Amino acid sequence: MGSGTGIGRVRGLGSAKHGAMHWWRQRVTAVSNLLLATWFVVAMFRLPSLSHEAVVQWVGSPMVAVPLVLLTISIFYHMRLGLQVVVEDYVHEEAGKVFFLLLLNFYAIGGAALAIFSILKIAFAGVSA
């Protein structure tokens, strides 16, 4: 039962040996996104005001900053997993596939890093050295 057999493909043991794991990661991040985004929306509605000062003070709490960082990681990772499938399915030239997957990775890591930096900057702004 090699990786080229039908049963191997069903088990996720195709040529790259990562199909099932990729599918599972997409589902786990989808559930994570659902839970964390629900928390975020409910928490935003519970704020007394959406003024800049109120939101900055809210994000400054560790009980808010940590879930926001987790939400950011989950969203960007989920986006990267989904777009990877699109690139792998619709870009047929190997050089183009490599280019777009590298671009996707740089975008996902860069976007997540920028968002996390922004959250942490706000969270640590009130902490004196």
Image (spheres, rainbow, N blue to C red):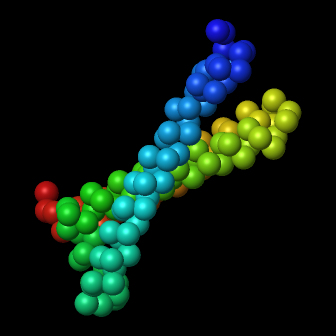
Q: Is residue 8 visible?
A: yes
From the viewer's perspective, tell me whether residue 85 is left or right of residue 22: right
Question: Quick one: 106 or 3, which is closer to the camera?
Answer: 3
Question: Quick one: 9 or 28, which is closer to the camera?
Answer: 9
On the rendered image, what quadrant is the C terminus found in? bottom left
Please, is residue 67 above or below residue 19 in the view?
below
Please, is residue 91 above or below residue 17 in the view?
below
The location of residue 23, given as percent across then percent down, is 56, 39
The location of residue 59, given as percent across then percent down, is 28, 70
The location of residue 67, given as percent across then percent down, is 30, 59
From the viewer's perspective, tell me whether residue 89 is left or right of residue 39: right
Q: Residue at x 58, y 25 (%)?
A: 11
Please, is residue 63 above or below residue 77 in the view?
below
The location of residue 100, given as percent across then percent down, is 73, 42
Question: Quick one: 46 or 49, which is closer to the camera?
Answer: 46
Q: Residue at x 77, y 41 (%)?
A: 89
